[in-house]
Amino acid sequence: MNIDFPFHFDRRGRTAVADDDDHLREMIEELLFTSPGERVNQPDFGCGLRQMVFAPNSPEMAAALQFTLQAALQRWLGDLLQVKDLEVTSVDSTLNINLQYIRRSTNQSVAVQITGTM
């Protein structure tokens, strides 16, 4: 059973659940938006994307984030997915994260795109 994130109740008053694809996507988002040191029992969890919100957007910052994200995905979600391609680009005030991975349980290729304004 995969508990849906963020935690909430379904229309029957039970804990909401997510299917495997949605749950994996939610875990990727949690990894992205959690800052290292934020979790008490896992102080190394996260990649620090939120810390870069007010940083100047540049190709160098995108490259650093790509390296950090690649390492975090391998460390925390490596047993569930294999990163096929990861590209982090910055254009003007927009940061684009394009992730393509293979779900290890089904060998299915999945693409995720996350875009944010800095």
Image (cartoon, grey):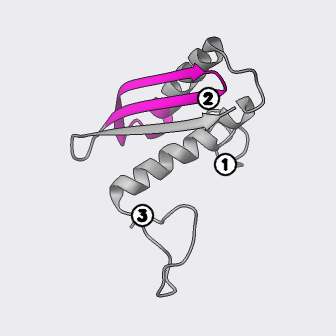
User: Which residue carries the number 3 mark?
Assistant: 2
Dot 2 surroundings within 10 Å: few (below 14), some, or many (20 or more)? some
Residue kind at label 3, given as amino acid type? Asn
User: Which residue carries the number 1 mark?
Assistant: 41
Q: Is residue 60 left or right of residue 27?
A: right
Task: Give SS at disc 3.
Answer: loop
Task: Give SS at disc 2.
Answer: strand
Which sits in the foreground, 79 or 52? 52
Task: Give SS at disc 1.
Answer: loop
Give the spatial CA distance, label 2 vs label 1.
Answer: 33 Å
Q: Nearer the viewer, mark 2 or mark 1?
A: 2
Magenta stretch, residue numbers: 73-101
User: Which residue carries the number 2 mark?
Assistant: 94
Give the spatial CA distance, label 3 vs label 2.
Answer: 32 Å
Residue kind at label 1, given as amino acid type? Asn
Q: Which mark is residue 72?
A: none
Q: Nearer the viewer, mark 3 or mark 2?
A: 2
- The image quadrant that residue 115 belongs to is top right
Q: Is residue 55 magenta?
A: no
User: Looking at this rendering, what residue extends furthest in the top direction?
Assistant: 60
- Going from N to C along the chain, the mark reached first, 2 or 1, is 1
Give the residue at x 62% y 33%: 47
Question: What is the chief secondary structure element of the magenta stretch?
Answer: strand
- Going from N to C along the chain, the mark reached first, 3 or 1, is 3
Give the residue at x 49% y 52%: 26
Q: Quadrant of the N terminus?
A: bottom left
